[in-house]
Amino acid sequence: MTTGYVLILAVLILGGMIATLGDRIGMKVGKARLSLFNLRPRQTATVVSVLTGSLISASTLGLLFAVSRQLRTGVFQLEQIQTDLAQAQADLDAATDQRAQVQAELDDARRQESRAQKRLQDINAALQLALERQQETEGQLLDTQAQLEQRQELLEQSKAQLLTTRDQLQTVSQAATRLEGEIDRLQTDRDAQIAQRDREIAQRQQRLSQLQAQQQVLEADVARLERQYLGLLRGNVAIGRNQVLAFLVIRFTDPQEVPRFANQLLEQVNRAVIREIAPDMDPNRQVVFISPGEVEGLIRRLQDGREYVVRVLSAANYIVGEPCVVAAVNPCIDIFIETAPNDLVYEAGQVLAAINVPIPTTSGQALVDEINRLAESIQFRARQDGLVTEILQIGDGRGDSLRQFLDTVQATNQSVRIQAIAANPIYVAGPLRVELVAIANGRIVAQTNPSLPGVQRLPIPLN
């Protein structure tokens, strides 16, 4: 702020001094009636005044440019600054879009993590319940064993008492006549007590047998749950998330056949799931779950007479011996159905991807890496364009054919453009089969299928 005031003051003082000087010079020139360049004295005085004014302006601008760096930048670099500002704004918008996309992917990953955590919590809860039942059974077994030991001690005591009584009877056998009635009475009471105790022992032994049978059942349940838990920890997954359980391409001319087809499809998927998760289970028991609205939507789509690609996929990961399946509860294997019209995606001969390879500076392994990169780009484009298959076949699918193509390309010893061309019309259901063509200097030098009819070139230069 102080520098600005000083600058303004200096401009005013300098302008006043130069104006005064110019006025003095003009007066002297006018009084002296000087003439420059054959001009009249008055015109000469006017020229001097104009030069003096120009000097004032030049000195003012020179002073401003010399002192103020911002003024120099604003006058001479304003357009460049505006261009840089516009570029910076465009970069900021692109970064904002990328951040939104990354945030969406992060939210999706968090939702998947939440679902996995919930399933793990359910399994842990089932395992905890089984462990609690095992502990209760072990406690009952210990109590039963303690009761059996007590009964055995009572039996031993009874046997000892019986022996003692027999000894006493032998001792008093001489007085048997006199005490016979008393002995008979005592013997009857003793026999009744022994019979009662025998009956109690038999009942307790029967109860012990029942508890032992229950313990065996609970031990089997605990062992099964432990196997399921260990299977989950060890990654023994029978059906993975988004695993294709059924895949077919179908068209209906009679809309009345669609509901029956939908029921048969779900029955086949149900049996396939049982074979993977619990092969010993009844294959006709319902274990898969899909909302009725989704089935109705499938039926409506298939009734329009078009050809559709139908895929049934698993909605989550399920292990061998899934607890909810083995426990015979409600259907718990979530599935969903994807349908898409089996439309034409690529025409035969259409170029799907292309790369430029400088063969003289590319090794054999580097050429293989470039082909792998080309294959990845083809698969990525196919996914983006709606193909449901990711299996890529190059040429006839044999390694020897591809190796011969690479050897031919390597032998050209010149920069080539390798194009991946659709070998046949490719629909949504696939298969994704391409042929490779190498072009150098506008002519074909190698291709995986020599009988390929035509080559469509991409507008990208070779160099």
Image (cartoon, rainbow, N blue to C red):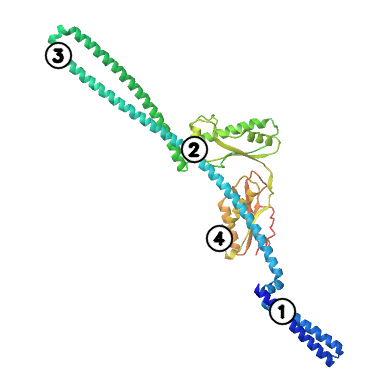
Element under disc 1: helix
Is residue 261 something that shows in the picture?
yes
What residue is drawn where x is 58% and y is 47%? 108
Element under disc 4: helix
Q: In this view, does 417 lie to the left or right of 174?
A: right
Residue 30 drawn above or below residue 110: below
The image quarter containing residue 10 is: bottom right
Nearer to me, 46 or 191: 46
Mark 4 → mark 1, Cα distance in angstroms: 70 Å
Nearer to me, 245 or 251: 245
Indicate the position of residue 424 as horizontal and vertical percent values: 66, 48
Q: Check the image and name the residue furthest to the left.
A: 174
The residue at which mark 3 appears reads as 170
Mark 3 → mark 4, Cα distance in angstroms: 110 Å
Element under disc 2: helix
Of labels 3 and 4, earlier in sequence is 3
The quadrant in which the C terminus is found is: bottom right
The residue at which mark 2 appears reads as 122
The residue at which mark 1 appears reads as 11
Residue 200 drawn above or below residue 246: above
Is residue 394 something that shows in the picture?
no
Indicate the position of residue 275 as horizontal and vertical percent values: 51, 34
Mark 1 → mark 3, Cα distance in angstroms: 150 Å
- Going by the numbered disc 3, the residue's amino acid type is Gln
Indicate the position of residue 73 as horizontal and vertical percent values: 68, 72
Residue 328 drawn above or below residue 412: above
- Going by the numbered disc 4, the residue's amino acid type is Ala
Of labels 2 and 1, earlier in sequence is 1
The residue at which mark 4 appears reads as 366
Nearer to me, 104 or 57: 57
